Amino acid sequence: MTHTLFDKIWALHHVDTRADGKHLLYMDRHAVHELHAPHAFGLLDENERTVRRTDLTMVVQDHTVPTRPGVIRISPHIQATLQAGLRHGVKVLDVNDPEHGIVHVVTPELGIALPGLTLACPDSHASTVGAIGCLAFGCGTTELVHVLSTQVMAMEKPRQMRIWLDGSLSNWVNAKDVALALIRRMGVSAARSTAVEYCGPVVEAMDIESRMTLCNMTIEWGGRTCLIAPDEKTIAWCKGRRGAPQGQAWDEALAWWRTLHTDAKAVFDEEHHLDCTDLSPQLTWGTDPAQVIGINEAVPQPMALDASAQDRATRALAYMAVKAGQSLDGLTIDRVFIGSCSNARLPDLRTAARVVQGRQVAAGVQALVVPGSSTIKRQAEAEGLDQIFLQAGFEWREAGCSMCAGANGDIGSPGQRCVATSNRNFENRQGRDVRTHLASPAMAAAAAIAGHLTDVRRLMETKA
């Protein structure tokens, strides 16, 4: 009998099926952030419950953490989370911890997320760690309490979809462009209640950090979770991580990880192909991640879209102050944000630094770079990337969610236009009436230099 990768991990963690038909799935790891931790731990206290496995649970401070250097602002969430963690004997990566960072960045970085494991996190972008073959599920606060106290999550088994990414990527086109193009094609709800597996030559060519960007964006088209089969790149990336197996346990883990792939004749509920060969850098023009065009395309006419999308498109055009039929190329911008759990890893910062090196941020543009973790920040500084950004006129920030979350003081002013490497462009997401264009680190960096939306390929050809 043949099995998908998802089925293999699911079967190893399936505990039982309840009378209501929901499945109980064992969770190997829990990762919690401070927006949910105080309430969840409070509910545990009220019901006289404890954390079943404190050794498998970690709490991260990220959403409300200020990222301006030298700024000390301890939010009620941060304070309550620290107290709750201490009370329950759970490891807390506090704001001053040398390994502090965004939850979806630090869990694989520290080897908390590993191939073949399951992970629960009260955050929609838990699917990020699917990039290394870790089966992760986002959950609500009530579900989180259940997971913390029982070590299992109750859920319906997702449908399964396989996405083949064919062809190859041209220069300055990367995983963020692939993700945006895919969401544009599929729509924001195509993967609802679905576990997605990504495969194909484009995925195989990606580094692990790029795969994390792709998996991070899965939730933006409705995915319940996602996976990429572990390969030799995955093994090399995981080796030596603090939480990775050591010695004989490492050898045993490798033998198991190499079985974690979809069998040749396994059947999915749906399969789709996307040829990435001619893909151009992508940008959002509207207020959801499916409202996307290539930099060389025009904003669509609402009447040319499906009937279900026309009203949404009309509203988005008004909010974004762009017109149907216009090009985004040359549209003046006010802010650039390079960061978030989608694009704040070391390769992302290296790419952006290549674009800005020897150049200056355009007058009137505020540009900031926010590393995804303190570890990434130190690595970038060791390579001199911080100096490249600072000399170009960028702000170099401390690790945290920053403008992606908007719950930490990092927001734009009404009417400002922002280019962001984050994963959401909803109305008011980055500040009241702020207009957000999602883009790759390369495209965001190019916009900061030009002072307007532009094709990074053209900018780099000019530099050459």
Image (tube, helix red, strand yellow):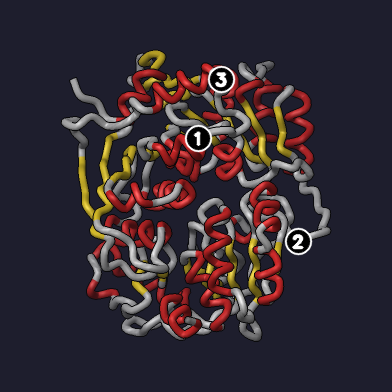
Identify which amino acid the numbered label 1 is placed on: Cys
Cβ atoms under marks 1 and 3 closer than 8 Å: no
Q: Is residue 405 left or right of residue 224?
A: right
- Of all residues, the one furthest to the left in this rendering is 265
Which of the two discs, 2 and 3, labels the residue nearer the N terminus?
2
Vertical relation: 75 (above or below) 19 = below
Residue at 58% from the left image edge and 33% from the top image edge: 240
Residue 137 higher or lower than 310, as above or below? above
Rendered image: mark on residue 92? none
- Ranked by sequence position, the earlier of labels 2 and 1 is 2
Identify the mark nearer the N-term, 1 or 3.
1
Q: CA distance from mark 2 to mark 3?
A: 41 Å
Residue 454 in the image: state x and y as whole percent: 45, 80
Q: Which residue is mark 2?
A: 68
Marks 3 and 2: in contact by CB < 8 Å?
no
| Amino acid type indicated by mark 2 | Arg
Quadrant (top left/top right/bottom left/bottom right) for the N terminus: top left
Question: Residue 79, position in %: x, y?
Answer: 79, 40
Residue 247's mark? 3
> Tag 1's secondary structure?
loop
Say the numbered circle drawn on residue 139: 1
Q: Secondary structure at mark 3?
A: loop
Residue 429 in the image: above or below residue 379: below
Q: Residue at x 80, y 48 (%)?
A: 74
Question: How many numbered discs sit on the rendered protein?
Answer: 3
Count residues near mark 3 (Cα–Cα under 10 Å), then give few for <14, some for 14-19, many for 20+: few
Front of the two marks 2 and 1: 2
Q: CA distance from mark 2 to mark 1?
A: 30 Å
Secondary structure category for the residue under label 2: loop
The residues tagged by marks 1 and 3 sit, at their Cα atoms, a distance apart of 34 Å
Q: Residue at x 27, y 30 (%)?
A: 4
On the rendered structure, is 400 left or right of 237? Answer: right
